[in-house]
Amino acid sequence: MTRDEQVVAWLGSACAGPTRWGTFAVLGEPGAAEIMAEQGFDFLLVDLQHGLLDWADVATFTRAIENVGAAPLVRVPSGDAASVGRALDLGAWAVVVPMIETGEQARQMVAATQYPPRGTRSFGPFRGRAAADDVARCLVMIETAAGVDNVAEIAAVDGILGIFVGPTDLGLSLGLGSAYEVGEPSHDDAVRTVVEACARAGVIAAIQTAGAAEATMRASQGFDLVSMRSDAALLRGAAAEILRAVH
């Protein structure tokens, strides 16, 4: 199977099978991302918004991740068309766009993943081209109360791959703070609203979680892609655990 065929098959089946598990790659070290992918994660999300990476790192990261059998997704720093196209050119199987609140914003980001006449993407024949550009490749993040209010319109945008819930920013938007309790009623109602809208529209529902217990719960709610913590958080936790053991 060629790389393009792998991309098409993975993206095309993301709603059809069991939950796929991932984590964020935020450390500026491709070796760390490769080690995480080797553990059996289905996808790694290379984080250009909050991670310690630059654009020059992306091609190396995406190659390292896909070479050990995981799917490299890339979160761009902001919702602009140039960033979306560049992430695909550098090897992202799909892009994740933060802070989307309206259907029109989502339509613009989807268009940025598609070549004319369907979209506005500039042709860059490096790594992201051919058959893979005929499938949906844009996940937009809902991270605010306004995004939740407009989720049905966002999920119905033609050509969208799915919606990725940013739970911490959503908690801040709902007035709960960043240390909200998982399962807090207003937060959980918002999360359920998103996953139900995705199910009705037939698109991917994705979410970031704090760990295995929450991840399992989110999978039971119907999320297709579930991310657990990050390479930095998992390294920090493992280091703290081994020190506690010896002390």
Image (spheres, rainbow, N blue to C red):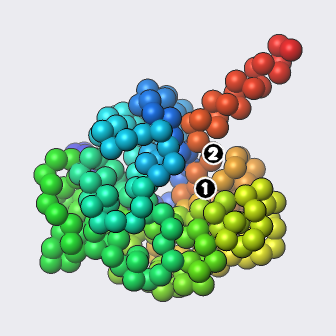
Q: Amino acid at mark 1?
A: Gln
Badge 2 density bin: few <14, some 14–19, many ≥20, Cα 10 Å: some
What residue sits 18% from the left and 69% below the top?
Answer: 115
What residue sits 37% from the left and 57% below the top?
Answer: 94
What residue sits 20% from the left and 59% below the top?
Answer: 131
Residue 91 as seen in the image, left or right of residue 99: left
Give the residue pinned by disc 2: 229
Give the residue pinned by disc 1: 208
Establish if 165 lies above or below 200: above
**Horizontal and vertical percent for residue 54?**
37, 41
Badge 1 density bin: few <14, some 14–19, many ≥20, Cα 10 Å: many
Identify which residue, 48 or 138, lies in the foreground.
Answer: 48
**Horizontal and vertical percent for residue 10?**
38, 55
Establish if 91 lies above or below 142: above
The answer for how far apart the CA atoms under marks 2 and 1 are is: 7 Å
Task: Determine whether the residue tagged by mark 2 lies in a helix, strand or loop.
Answer: strand
What residue sits 14% from the left and 60% below the top?
Answer: 123
Q: Amino acid at mark 2?
A: Arg
